[in-house]
Image: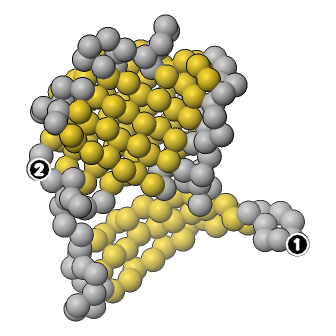
């Protein structure tokens, strides 16, 4: 699932149950035509003793964004690291990727995107070569880190990124949020 076709919202997560709601558009199976739209789906699943239980505070990561005011990006894969004082996050779906690299990250605060020292960049790709970048002429933006702890780095971002490679053209605007669990 690319993240563009549906949404799952967890409404309850305890040591004994997980509950939520979902909606999605299902593509046709091979040999069939038409899509199916599922709305108002719900689940409430008990978690038995000895089951997976609730994840530790340093586990799990997410990234969501809106691109050009209408395209919804919900990452299906998120990886990141804090190496020295450089925070890197890479989030992707089957059709889009968003990555950021921020130098001199040591606490919560607003980090302005820049191609100059300290280098702080945000890239958007389409998965087949097109790349838009914040660190080129006309690019701009910032990342606000609201949580910086041994367990998690989280915040929001806004940027204008400029097409620079692979047939990318024009600027894109992107705004979103991320939450990176620092556990291994």
Which residue has dot 2 on it? 150
Q: Position of residue 60 (x, y in %)?
A: 30, 60
38 sits left or right of 162 in the view? right
Marking on residue 72? none
Q: Are marks 1 and 2 in contact (CB under 8 Å)?
A: no
85 or 98: nearer the viewer: 85
Q: Residue 130, relative to residue 20: is it above or below?
A: above
Q: Secondary structure at mark 1?
A: loop
First of labels 1, 2 by sequence position: 1
Residue drawn at x 56%, y 35% is 125
Q: Considering the image in quadrants, where does the N terminus appear?
A: bottom right
For the residues carrying marks 1 and 2, which lies nearer the camera in this image?
Answer: 2
Q: Residues within 10 Å of mark 1 (few under 14, many from 20)?
A: few
Q: Residue at x 49, y 22 (%)?
A: 133
Residue that sits furthest to the front in the current view: 84
Q: Position of residue 145 (x, y in %)?
A: 23, 34
Residue 38 seen: yes
Residue 32, image x, y percentages: 86, 71
What quarter of the picture does the C terminus occupy?
bottom left
Residue 158: in sight, yes or no? no
Which color scheme is applied? secondary structure
Which image quarter: residue 5?
bottom right
Which residue is at a point 28% across and 28% down the rendered structure image? 102
Count neighbours of disc 2 (C-alpha within 10 A) and say few if under 14, some if 14 to 19, many if 20 or more. few
Q: Which residue is mark 1?
A: 31
The structure residue drawn at horizontal position 18% and vertical position 61%, both measured from the top left corner, is 57
Return the residue nearer the eye: 154 or 36: 154
| Location of residue 85 with respect to 92 vertically, above or below | above
Q: Secondary structure at mark 2?
A: loop
Q: Label 1 to label 2, Cα distance in Å?
A: 50 Å
Q: Is residue 109 above or below residue 42?
A: above
């Amino acid at each position: 699932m690319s993240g563009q076709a549906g949404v799952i919202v967890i409404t309850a997560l305890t040591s004994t149950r997980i509950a939520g709601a979902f909606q999605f558009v299902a593509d046709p199976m091979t040999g069939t035509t038409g899509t199916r739209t599922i709305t108002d789906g719900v689940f409430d699943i008990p978690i038995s003793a000895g089951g997976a239980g609730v994840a530790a505070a340093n586990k799990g990561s997410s990234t969501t964004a809106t691109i050009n005011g209408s395209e919804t990006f919900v990452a299906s894969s998120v990886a990141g690291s804090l190496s020295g004082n450089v925070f890197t996050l890479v989030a992707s779906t089957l059709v889009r990727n968003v990555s950021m690299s921020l130098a001199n990250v040591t606490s919560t605060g607003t980090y302005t995107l820049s191609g100059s020292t300290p280098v702080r960049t945000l890239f958007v790709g389409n998965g087949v070569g097109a790349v838009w970048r914040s660190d080129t002429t006309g690019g701009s933006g910032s990342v606000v880190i609201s949580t910086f702890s041994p367990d998690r780095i989280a915040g929001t971002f806004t940027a204008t990124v400029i097409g620079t490679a692979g047939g990318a053209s024009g600027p894109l605007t992107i705004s979103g949020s991320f939450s990176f669990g620092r556990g291994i």
